[in-house]
């Protein structure tokens, strides 16, 4: 089987980069040709342990967890990716805001942890003020009593900055 040949190739790899590429190929075969997301996730999890800074690994695992509906796994990977982006001085504010909003949306859809949802939307706005998805997410939650004071304070600042006096 091709996977066995590739595993042997990986074990004989001359350097870490070569081994990494072979493992990506193995994970892709499990996922795309053999339709086995569980085995693919296992390969990508081992890659994450060996190469925690590789964003491709995060993307591959995120995609598998999303397909499989593994929300906890997806939140874990997204959290690691966010931590990497926050350490990266070259990270684009729009990418940070996008990831915070994705985490907020997933938390809102799958948990009752509204304080964390609001924290992620607020963090998105700190990364990129007036980020539309974050504003929309907060507006959707404004009626939730447990987080209403925080949301009202944040939205007041947003609306003032936008000179949106109708809100």
Image (spheres, rainbow, N blue to C red):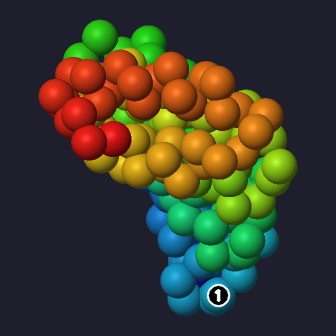
**Residue 158 falls left or right of residue 150:** left
> Which corner quadrant holds the C terminus?
top left
Q: Residue at x 79, y 34 (%)?
A: 146
Determine if residue 45 is in view: no
Q: Nearer the viewer, residue 28 or 117?
A: 117
Q: Residue at x 39, y 42 (%)?
A: 135
Determine if residue 151 is in view: yes
Q: Which residue is mark 1?
A: 35
Q: Nearer the viewer, residue 92 or 132?
A: 132
Q: Position of residue 30 (x, y in %)?
A: 63, 77
Q: Position of residue 41 (x, y in %)?
A: 70, 62
Q: Residues within 10 Å of mark 1 (few under 14, many from 20)?
A: few
Residue 137 vertical placement versus 163 (above, below): below
Q: Position of residue 106 (x, y in %)?
A: 63, 55
Residue 138 vertical placement versus 80 (above, below): below
Q: Residue at x 59, y 43 (%)?
A: 142
């Amino acid at each position: 089987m091709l996977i066995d040949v590739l595993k042997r190739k990986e074990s004989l790899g001359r350097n870490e980069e070569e081994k990494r590429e072979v493992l990506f190929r193995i994970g892709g075969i499990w996922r795309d040709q053999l339709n086995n997301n569980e085995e693919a996730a296992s390969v990508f999890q081992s890659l994450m342990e060996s190469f925690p800074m590789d964003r491709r690994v995060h993307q591959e695992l995120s995609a598998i967890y999303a397909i499989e509906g593994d929300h906890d796994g997806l939140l874990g990977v997204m959290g690691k990716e966010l931590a990497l982006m926050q350490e990266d001085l070259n990270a684009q504010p729009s990418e940070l805001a996008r990831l915070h909003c994705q985490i907020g949306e997933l938390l809102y859809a799958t948990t009752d942890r509204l304080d964390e949802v609001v924290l992620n939307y607020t963090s998105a706005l700190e990364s990129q003020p007036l980020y539309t998805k974050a504003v929309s997410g907060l507006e959707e939650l404004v009626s939730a009593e447990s987080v209403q004071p925080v949301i009202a304070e944040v939205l007041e600042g947003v609306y003032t900055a936008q000179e949106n006096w109708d809100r």
